[in-house]
Image: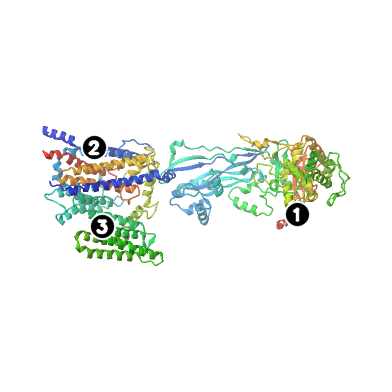
Amino acid sequence: MTPRNIDTGASIFRSLDWFTIILYLVLVTFGAISIYAASYDFDNASLFDFAEFSGKQFLWIGLALVLGLVIFLLDYRLYEAYAYPIYAAVILLLIVTIFVAPDIKGSRSWLSFGPVSLQPAEFGKFATALALAKLFDSYNFSLNTKLSNYYRALIIIFLPIALILMQKETGSALVYLSLVLVLYREGMPGIVLWSILCAVTYFVIAVKYTTPLILGIPCGEFIVFVAIMAIFAGMLLFYCKDFFIGRNVLIGFVSTGVIVLVLALCGIVINGRVYFITVILLAAAYTAVAMFRHRIGKFVVTISFAIASMLFLFSVNYVFGNILQPHQQQRIKVALGIVEDIRGAGYNVNQSKIAIGSGGLTGKGFLNGTQTKLKYVPEQHTDFIYCTIGEEEGFVGSVMLLVLFATLILRLITIAERQRTAFGRVYGYCVVSYLTFHLAINIGMVLGLCPVIGIPLPFISYGGSSLWGFTILLFIMLRIDAARKERID
Amino acid sequence: MRKDYNLEKRKYVIASLVCVITIIYIIRLFNLQIGDSTYKDSAESNAFLRKIIYPARGLVYDRNDNLVIFNQPAYDVMLVPRDVGQFDTLSLCSILGITRDRFDLLWEDMKDSRKNPGYSAYTPQKLMSHLTQEEYGRLQEKLYLFPGFFIQKRTVRQYTYHAGANVLGNIREVSAEDVEKDRYYRSGDYTGDLGIEKSYEKVLRGVKGMEIMMKDANGTIQGKYENGVHDVAPVAGKNLKLSLDMELQEFGESLMSGKTGAIVAIEPATGEILALVTSPNYDPSLLIGKDRGKNYAKLVRNPFKPLYDRSIQARYPPGSTFKPTQGLIFLQEGVVTTGTAYPCHRGYVNGIRVGCHGHASPITLKPALETSCNAYFCWGLKNMLDKRGTTAAAQLTKWKNYLVEMGYGYKLGIDLPHESRGFIPNAEYYSESFRGNNWSANSVISISIGQGEVLATPLQIANLGATIANRGFFYTPHVVKEISDSTIDKRFKVRHQPKIRREYYEVVAEGMRMAVLGGTCKGANLPDIEVCGKTGTAQNPHGRDHSVFMGFAPYHNPKIAICVYVENAGFGATYGVPIGALMIEKYLRRELPEGRKAAANSMIHSKTISSSDAKKH
């Protein structure tokens, strides 16, 4: 090594974001201890016994730190330069995995190397992030200049999704959808994010509330129709900023609504679907006629949004009943609380709620959780690790972990924003998106708020692939961040 | 590089999204962990199997230390419904020796929340009880085939004697009501029913113990929770020593066979009951084991009501056995002295007529007791109620108070359930039934000879015998003499003393001695034993007169007081006296002399009821 290199190395460690590294170390330690607790047997094994999950996890953590060190010591330009080759290599690995991997519980996502198994899907995350960052970093690239730019970004995102779906790892595939946040940050119209949010909400409401009937339609559908009307009027008022049209539409909605409800109370029930479709279409037509006096764009968006919302609503029942697999329907229904099947798909969620709920304010104490010790919660050292924390550390510990994660994500947003290159920023937001999605889905599922989608809790759940995948993802970000000052030179 | 500050603002949207999710999750955690305590219970019922260890129920001995009730192991098939996995129903049925239909019925009963209010899929439930030793062995061997099932050991009662069922009682499974009343019980537990098993339930049952086992998600036991430091050892029930002499009890029951009625024998000096016979009765062994329900139903349907303990529950007219109380009251009130004589012209003739039989007239108290003269006591009561300077009502109240002090009119407080209080009319009662104060001594005169409205239990009549034997005091009669490691209720050690002077009791005792020597109770005149007695021939609206005997022996330093009440058996002398004499003899001599065995046998074989009587009831 030349003296200059040593100097560079030293300066890298000075300019690293130690706050994030400490958060990382706290989280992995929290994880290893929880894994020890979750897999603790009454025959009392050693914390560092490599035959045990916790022992192995310490080994993975050790190796992850070595990996992190290597990432720090490599030149940051390497990641930029080799972004596409790395992406290509991982894509190739994902393809190979489909054909080579043995079938484990219906999933073909694990590659076996003797005693060690790797899940390539976990490494797809940083590779995809690198490729996406590289794309946005191309000269004069801006998402909204050409539609093809969207295609290119979406291809990078959907290629791993398709391959991972073919490995039948639905959960891991869905994670990549979170990159929509990156697209949003980089200029995707907010209406798209808004649409996605509305779509998810409409879906949940429409599927969850099938009874009682209001005006002859399920109350979930009724609520969604009302929401569509409210959003339509709201967008006219606040998005198009046209008080006149907005007011008229609102008056129309409210007056017809009151008439229909009064008639219903008198025993003359007008079918809700007929009423809503007629009224919303009439309002859209009125707006379409009235808008020609104004700037057209926002009115078109508003009208399209309302009509698309209705179309979406109609397709929900069709999609739910005909496209989703029965077991997926089941999982969604259980998550939404439509079915209470305690021995079946709801068992995991129910037992995990029991585990967390029984923790109380301060928990039962380390290694004292009966739910997890006696293996009532399946997957308790992997996807359901948060149960152990909830049971043994209670509300205090659970909230602490949640806050640690939120802090890490907010810190990463700060780091991403302070990057001077699109590469660094986009990569940073990729990390933010992945972590947010994992956190929201994993903990949401354990708390019984989200469907049971089997994805790990980053840094905490047991598993070398997941830990290494997230370590690489995070440390590359830190390495790029540490190079900010070098770039000035 | 160009920076789009408009887009940079979007970082706030993304950061808010993260914060909103975090806050929603914190609220959810709060609801789960702090707001809702049901999850804690679920976790406990998940993880812990609380296996109850039943204590051995206390044993019961009689006054001579003969074992009367003991325990035998019994086995129940238990299961935790949630843990029950796949199993071969038919093979389980064949092991248990039941049909498939029976199994389905048991299963439904177990799940029926009306029959089994404690049902929960998470806690042990009883499927079937009373396995034989053999069935237990077979099931224990194959238990691994039936996940979620286990066997609970309990004890059932066994009886050495086929007598005393009314005193001993039995045990039954707790009802939904019991469980609600006493949180100690859980569905499937046993509790005492009737007799001392009921009244001494809390002494006999002991305290249940508990073993806390941990089970995993498969229902497999993972061993004791924290090495059993939280386990609770059961405390065995306490043993009881009855005051009953079981041989006397058996003898009494045999004497009463074929008759309806009761015998109560009391040790006067202590109030301990030596025998408490009701007839007809039943073998206590009928009410144990699998056939309990069937046998119980049969006993309930029996027209002679064997479950009805006539010795403490029946309200009979005491008849002439009531006369000593009248003599005592008249003497204490100064209505008569031992020298006061009343005329008897084949009865009390004074506007109304109360019949009597032939004897010398006029007559004083002692011979009146000897001959059981009705007229004497009618005159006595008339003179008492008609006393100048006071009202009949006030005098009757006084009269009633004496009787209450003697143990009549209220429950005596025996340590057995369902005691009856008998009936002693008071002034208010007559004012009501005669619509105002429109009554006089004559209208109530029959109460002086133990007829009319007066009703008493055989126990109360025997207690009178004990009081006279003691010359003026009694202890509350009781059937339990001692409780191991404990003492019996203090109220059984309290001496009750009616406000009547001892010398008057001496007078009455002498009259009763005379009745045995030369009066109505001649049949009780035993060689070497100085018996005192009083017969009764109680008229009743239901048919033939009841035959009654009340007495004690020996005359000096009495050891036994007795009441014999035989329904519809005619004169006191025909059944009451000989049975009473035999009981006294049996108790005092331990064995009947050879010459008396024939008398006992003929009494055992004589019947006052026949199967045709059953139809009348």
Chain of the residue displaying label 1: B
- Which sits in the foreground, A310 or B322? A310
Residue B244: x and y, percent? Answer: 68, 40
Q: Which mark is residue A19?
A: 2
Tag 3: residue type? Leu
Is residue B534 placed above or below A163 in the rendered structure? above
Residue B585: x and y, percent? Answer: 77, 40
CA neighbours of label 3 inside 10 A, class few (<14), some (14 to 19), many (20+): some
Q: In terms of image quadrants, where is residue B597?
A: top right
Q: Is residue B574 left or right of residue A2?
A: right
Label 3 element class: helix
Label 3 sits on residue: A237
Pointer 2 with pointer 1, Cβ within 8 A = no
Q: Which mark is residue B541?
A: 1
User: How far is mark 2 from mark 3, CA to CA?
Assistant: 44 Å
Tag 2: residue type? Phe
Q: In terms of image quadrants, where is residue B223?
A: top left
Label 1 element class: loop
Whether residue B256 is visible here, answered yes or no, is: no
Q: In terms of image quadrants, where is residue A49?
A: top left
Is residue A87 placed above or below A47 in the rendered structure? below
Q: Is residue A97 left or right of residue B195?
A: left
Residue B28: x and y, percent? Answer: 35, 46
